[in-house]
Image: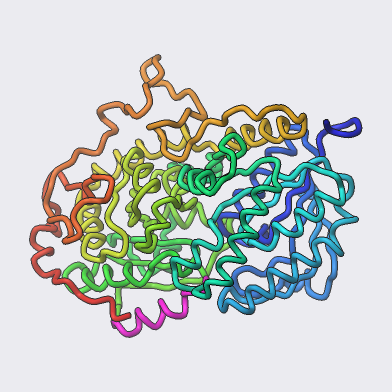
Amino acid sequence: MRRGAGPPRVLLVTHYFPPEVGAPQARLSETARAWAAAGLDVTVLTGMPNHPTGVVPTSYRGALRRFEHTDGYRVVRTWLYATPNEGVLRKTLSHLSFMVTSVLLGGRPAGPVDVVVVSSPTFFALGSAWVLARLRRARLVVEIRDLWPAIFVQLGLITNRRVIAVLEKLELAAYRAADAVVTVTEGFREDIIRRGIPAEKVHVIPNGVDLDRFRPDEPASAEVRAQLGAGPADTLVLYVGAHGISQGLASVADAAALLAEETPSIRFAFVGEGADKRRLTEHIRRLGLTNTTLAPAVPRSDVAALVASADICLVPLRDVPLFETFIPSKMFELLAAGRPLIGSVRGEAARILTDAGAVVVPPEDPEALACAVLELATDPDRNEAMGLAARDYVERYFDRSALADRYRRLLLQVLAGQPQEEQPHHGQPPHHGQPTSNRQEGGQQLPDGLWPEHELPAPASACQPSAQGQLRDGTQPVPRPRQPGPEDPRTVARHMGRRGSDR
C-alpha cells in the first residue's frame, strides 16, 4: 500500500532528458508531462544535458546539482562525466558517473517517493534506481527500451564471454527486483519472458507520438529545403535522427550513389549526430556524392518543420536479427506528419509500417531502397494517399497521451499492490493491439486493420524487387507506382548495377 496522503509520488530516473534531442528524451518528457497533468507528483532525476556531443551547455557547466520546474513536474540534475556518444570506455565512464551521482547528489533532493521508474538504456541507471527504491522503501518499475547487453553482442561490440555473462546476470537481477517491467515492443516482452520473468509482470507500452506536435498541415519551408540542398522542383529524401551504429546509414548513402547520375533531382539529407557520423561523412566523401547533404542535429522544436519540408522520409536499421524486435520511435512522428515513408526494417517495425500503408524494403539493401525512392518520387497521388492512411493509423494506435495514461494506470496498480491487469500490447497492431482512440469513418468505427478504400496505396510494379526477395514475414518489399513518371524507374533501374558499400 502507498504511504501517506496526497497524490502518488513518482521518481523517474533517466540518463537522457531534454534539452537533449532524441527518442528517449521525447518519450520520457512527454510522459512526465502527461502524468503531472493527470495529478501525479512527478520528479525527474537526470544528469546535466550533453548527449550526443558531450558538450554541456554553458548554463549548466560547473554545477554539481541543478533544480528546474517545467510542465508541472520537477527536474533534479546531477553532475556526470560528459563525453561524446562514441567510444565504449568513455561512454561507460559517463554512465557509471551518473549511477553514482544520482544517488549521492540526487537522492535526498528528490524527496519522498512512492514508486521509482527507471528507463534503460543506460544499463547502469538500473543500479541507482534500485538503490533509491530500497532507501525510500518504494516500488520499482523498470522500463526497457533496448535489450542490453544483447544489442552490443549482436553488433560485435562486446565479445568477451565472461563480461557478457556478468552483464546478463545483472540484467536479469534488475528484472527480478522490479515490481513491474515495461517494454516498448512485443519482441522485447517475449525475450524477457523466455528468460524466466513471469509473464504477468511484463507489460508492453510502446512509443507513440505527440499528435499536436507533428501534423500533416505543417507548412514546408523553402529555406529549410535550400539548407538541405534541395530546390523547389527537387525530391528531398530525409533521414533525421541518431547517426549511430544501429541505423546502417552507409547503405542509405549507397542508395544515393545509385541514383546520383541518372536522377540528380533526388536529393538526400542526413540530419543529426551520433557515434557513426564521422564514418558516414568519410563514406560519402569516398563515394564522391554531390546529391547528399550532412547537417547537425536541430532542436526538437524544429523537427516538425524539418520533416514537413521533406518529400520522402527514411527509417533504416542494420540487418541484425535482434533488430526484428525493435521499433524505431521516429517512425511514429513521421507517420503522424503524413509524410511518405520508407522503412528499411524487418519484423515488428515492418509489420507496423505495412499496416500504416508505408513502404518497406529489406534493411541494408541499397538497390531496393533506391528503387523505392524512385517509385515514390514518380507517384505524387500515391504519396498523398500514404500520408492520409499514416496519420489515421497513428491517431488510432499510437497517441502518446493515451499511452501515458495507460502507463499511469499501471503505476497505480503497482502502488496498490493489486494483481496487475493484462495491459493491451500494441507492439504489432492491428493484429493484436487495441486502439488508443475510436477512429470513425462514415459514422461507423472501422474494424482493426481496415481502412477506407480511397486511403489504401494501390500496389503495382515497375522496379524489380532486390535480390534478397521478400521480407522474412512474407511482405512484398517494394510497392509499385500506378503509372510511369518523368523519371520512370523502369528506365533508370537498368542503370542500377549492384555496388559495394565501400565499407
The quadrant of the rendering that contains the N terminus is top right
Q: Residue at 64% of width from left, 78% of height from top?
A: 90
Magenta segment's dominant SS is helix
**Pick the front one: 139 or 253:** 139
Specify whether residue 285 is painted magenta: yes
Q: Is residue 207 visible?
A: no
- Quadrant of the rendered image containing residue 298: bottom right
Q: Is residue 209 visible?
A: yes
Q: Position of residue 174 (x, y in %)?
A: 67, 53
**Pick the front one: 87 or 255:** 87
Number of numbered discs: 0
Q: Residue at 35% of width from left, 43% of height from top?
A: 351
**Pick the front one: 67 or 169:** 169
The quadrant of the rendering that contains the C terminus is bottom left
**Image check: 453 left or right of 202?**
left
User: Seen from this angle, which residue lies furthest top?
Assistant: 443
**Image check: 21 left or right of 496?**
right
Q: Which residues are magenta?
A: 274-287
Specify whether residue 151 is painted magenta: no
Q: Residue at 56% of width from left, 42% of height from top?
A: 210
Q: Position of residue 229 (x, y in %)?
A: 37, 70
- Quadrant of the rendered image containing residue 430: top left
**Image check: 272 left or right of 497?**
right
